[in-house]
Image (cartoon, grey):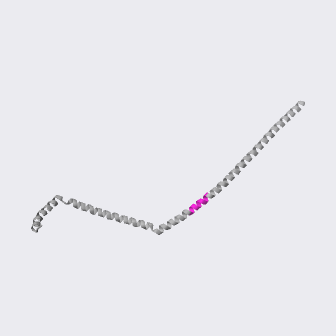
Amino acid sequence: MENNIENAMDYQKLIYEESLKQTELLEKQAKSAKIQMIIVSVLMVIVAIALLVLSVQVGGVLEQANSAIDEITVLTKELNTVLEESNVTELLNNANALIEESGDALTKALEDVDEALNTVSQIDIETLNSAIADLQKVIQPLAKLFGR
């Protein structure tokens, strides 16, 4: 029986040592959890600060964008007014009509020039020179007769 008691004491000692090891490991685990919690908290604070800074910057950018859009709207309205008052469309249509009329007149003039060139090219120059020479022969005696 003494052997049993010794064995029981050995088991109790072994259980006690294991219990101490487990307690030590649990304390390390709790310490590790606290460190992780602190790190996560710090990271969350950093992220929150970054979000605040970004939201302020985005707000400024949006304000500038709205201002630019307002200016573009004003400029567009002014341009519209100028275009309506100046009748640019009508002016361009009139210019287009004038260009078309000028083109038609130029085409007609070129056709007339072409017709004149065709007429000139049909003239027999040798016969014309011969007729002029004959006329000169007839007029010279008449000119001498009238004292020229």
> Is residue 1 something one can see in this rendering?
no
Where residue 43 appears, as percent x and y from the top left, is 70, 49
Q: Position of residue 81 (x, y in %)?
A: 50, 68
Residue at image location 33% in from the left, 64% down from the top: 104
Residue appearing at x 28%, y 62% in the figure: 111
Q: Residue visible at 52% across and 66% down?
A: 78
Q: Residue furthest right?
A: 2
Q: Locate residue 127: give its quadrant.
A: bottom left
Query: On the rendered structure, is 6 left or right of 52?
Result: right
**Is residue 36 or residue 92 the one in the foreground?**
92
Q: Is residue 42 magenta?
A: no
Specify the quadrant that holds the N terminus. Answer: top right
Q: What secondary structure characterizes most of the magenta part?
A: helix
> Exactly how many numbered labels are in the figure?
0
Extreme residue toward the top, this view: 3
Give residue 109's quadrant in the image.
bottom left
Whether 66 is among the magenta residues is yes
- Residue 81 shown left or right of residue 5 in the figure: left
Residue 100 appears in the rendering: yes
Nearer to me, 3 or 91? 91
Residue 49: x and y in percent read 69, 53
The vertical placement of 15 against 68, above or below, is above
Magenta-drawn segment: 61-70
Residue 70 x %, y %: 57, 63
The residue that appears at 37% across and 66% down in the rendered structure is 98
Quadrant for the C terminus in the image: bottom left
Can you tell which quarter of the image residue 24 is in?
top right
